[in-house]
Amino acid sequence: MGNSVPLAWMESFALAALVSLDFLAIRAGWLTTEQHAAVVTVCLMGLLMMTWLRFHRGMHPVWLFLGMLLLFQGGRMVAMMMGIDGDPYLIDLQSPIPFTLTTEANLTATWLLLLSGVAIYIPCSLSYQESSFEAPAGRDVTLALLMLFLATFPFHIYKNVQYLSYIRSHGGYLAIYTDGGAHLEAAGSLARVLSQVCSSAFLLYFVYEQRKRRLLAVCAAYFAVTVVELLIGLRGKAFLLLFTFLFLYKKKQGSHFKGVPLVILVTALGAVAQLVAGFREMRESAAASPAVFLWAQGVSFQVTAVAVGFRHLFSPHGLDYILNQIPLVFVPQDRFGEGQLFGIDLSNFLNAEAMRLGFGTGSTYLAEAYVLGGIPGVGIASVLIGMLLSRLHLALRGASCAFAMVAMTNVIYMPRSGMIEPFAATFKSWISLAATLVAAHAVQRGMEMIRREQ
């Protein structure tokens, strides 16, 4: 430990110098947009490799976050380096006529990826402590959690099947965003509530259960239903759940990711994602290579780039974009209007007609941070994210593990979501977790009373 702190500081200064040098290079005009894209992509890949080596082969939430950053924001640049024929700076997201931004905007947007990645990594490196999994106290509640899961699991299946049936009969995936939340009523309030209890009970059971075979059997049942969510079109949710639970499973076993199996898994998921993309839009999907998958996922960079290029149009509503994400997890998105959510304003800016038909762009923490505070805003937001990921790394143990797991799952998706929405979603899930845990303790006490009376 005596050598790790100086090494972390040296590493941090070197990374900060790299970011500064890159900024000077683009301001001086030493790099073209294509050259800069390659430089930033290599740097992000190197940063991801550093987290792999520094944090026990990726066993830290920051590794997952930086992986999502590279995929969703740098995916097109990686695909370009793999030989795909396309311009990663071309704005074709929803726009009827693709266009390009100024060279300065493109260079700045790409540089923000490097700034954010380094600003997130440094707090994690400086504060890093090894943290092993510890089972929560009071494991006698494990059986009660399993009983709650089994009792509510049929409602979880029913809800997802009803969603799929509704969406397939109402034009496909876009019905989620155009029906004013009507698809939620397809399953009914009771099924939705009990489905949420089922998911909470599964997570808590996953944390508490120490018997490997029984845990894997329950996992197989739960993730089998995730196939239905894939067919609905919720690719991000399904794959994110898979990776985060795999992460937690490795942590529970005191293990770590392995390079070759991980590459195979990611490649397979990429192929599945392309098939799902066709199914959810009710069209045939052509076979896709890894480069095509990366190109498709990297479209979120365009959200960041447009925010940089047209910040003056969006900045008057910057604070509203942030605050309105709090109620967003409780009400449908179509309840919001102009000037309330960045994704809505951006979609209207790019193609108002497509927006009326239900097509949208989504958001990203980089875009919202830049709209609100410019380059300093991105830097501050990224440092705070890094500090939060460090805290989550230490909280993935004991009684706090399930709650930290929910927060981690939402936070690492921020390269493709807004700045506050993940925290509002986390709070909503925490309520369900707490209520489920209280119910499990009540069931456990009830079983004890029955045993004593017998």
Image: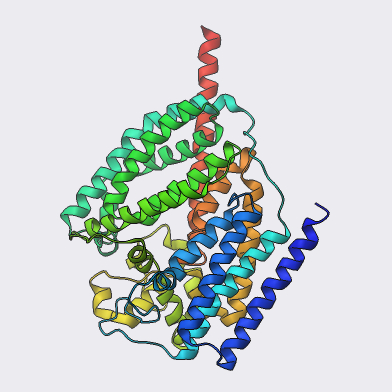
Rendered view: 407 above or below 71: above
Q: Is residue 229 left or right of residue 39?
A: left
Q: Residue at x 56, y 61 (%)?
A: 48
Residue 294 appears in view = yes
The tally of labels here is 0
In front of the other: 227 or 402:
227
Rendered view: 186 above or below 85: above
Q: Residue furthest bottom?
A: 28
In front of the other: 80 or 92:
80
Q: Residue at x 24, y 49 (%)?
A: 164
Q: How is the image coloured?
A: rainbow
Q: Position of residue 331 (x, y in %)?
A: 38, 60
Q: Residue furthest right?
A: 2
Specify the quadrant of the image occupied by residue 88: bottom left
Q: Position of residue 227 (x, y in %)?
A: 31, 45
Q: Position of residue 317 (x, y in %)?
A: 47, 80
Q: Residue at x 49, y 82 (%)?
A: 35
Residue 423 appears in view = no
Q: Position of residue 439 (x, y in %)?
A: 50, 32
Q: Is residue 279 left or right of residue 100?
A: left
Rendered view: 140 above or below 414: above
In front of the other: 239 or 175:
239
In front of the other: 362 or 196:
362
Q: Residue furthest left?
A: 169
Specify the quadrant of the image occupied by residue 196: top left
Q: Residue at x 53, y 8 (%)?
A: 453
